[in-house]
Image (tube, rainbow, N blue to C red):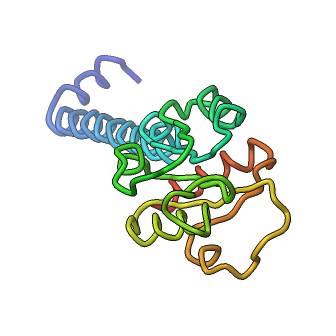
Amino acid sequence: MDISHNLEWIFGGVGVPAMVWLINYLIKKRKKNSDNNQLKIADTSYTKTELPKNQTRILFVDDKHTDFKMVSILKKSGWINTKSIKDVTDLNDPKVIEAEIIFVDINGVGTTLFQDQGLGLASALKKKYRGKKIVIYSSETTGDRFHKALREVDDCLHKEAEPYQFINLIESFIKNK
């Protein structure tokens, strides 16, 4: 078989349109695969919650807030907008308004507003700010297990829980937004 005969076929008559079609087909296929990969990368980066870490505002209300290490642990884990305050004396406090997730200690907070202290505060915050995630936490193992606030808030957590449990709870709130 003569090579000049093959070149004549490729560059003549049917060969040119066939080659143009083949090249266009391969280019389009490569572009489509590239676009799909970019979409997958974008989707996985969001579902891993790396993106919202620096945007999620977390507030701890704890009368012993200076002794509570969870705030610094969360900040070191990338939750940079994590704050702690000693108490809430006004439900319209700017720190409360800006927070998306609020952890409320049961004892020693909310004392100026509620007889039930933290339970009353957590209940009032959930009623006023339905879109916020409110979590009651405490180191106490005794108390009113049937208080209505325990059913109104989004979750409860032991104050001495592992940091992983706090982070896992926060991530589950973000994923279910």
Q: Relative to the observer, which residue lies in front, 70 or 40? A: 70
Q: Is residue 111 shown above or below 149?
A: above
In screen coordinates, is 72 left or right of 161? left
Q: Position of residue 8 (x, y in %)?
A: 22, 24
Q: Is residue 97 shown above or below 27?
A: below
Quadrant of the frame with the N terminus:
top left
Q: Residue furthest right?
A: 141
Identify the residue at image location x=80%, y=45%. 162
Q: Relative to the observer, which residue lies in front, 62 or 32? A: 62
Q: Quadrant of residue 140?
A: bottom right
Q: Position of residue 72 (x, y in %)?
A: 64, 29
Q: Is residue 82 shown above or below 90?
A: above
- Tag count: 0
Identify the residue at image location x=57%, y=30%. 78
Q: Residue furthest left?
A: 13
Quadrant of the frame with the C terminus:
bottom left
Q: Is residue 98 shown above or below 111?
A: above
Q: Position of residue 88 (x, y in %)?
A: 48, 51
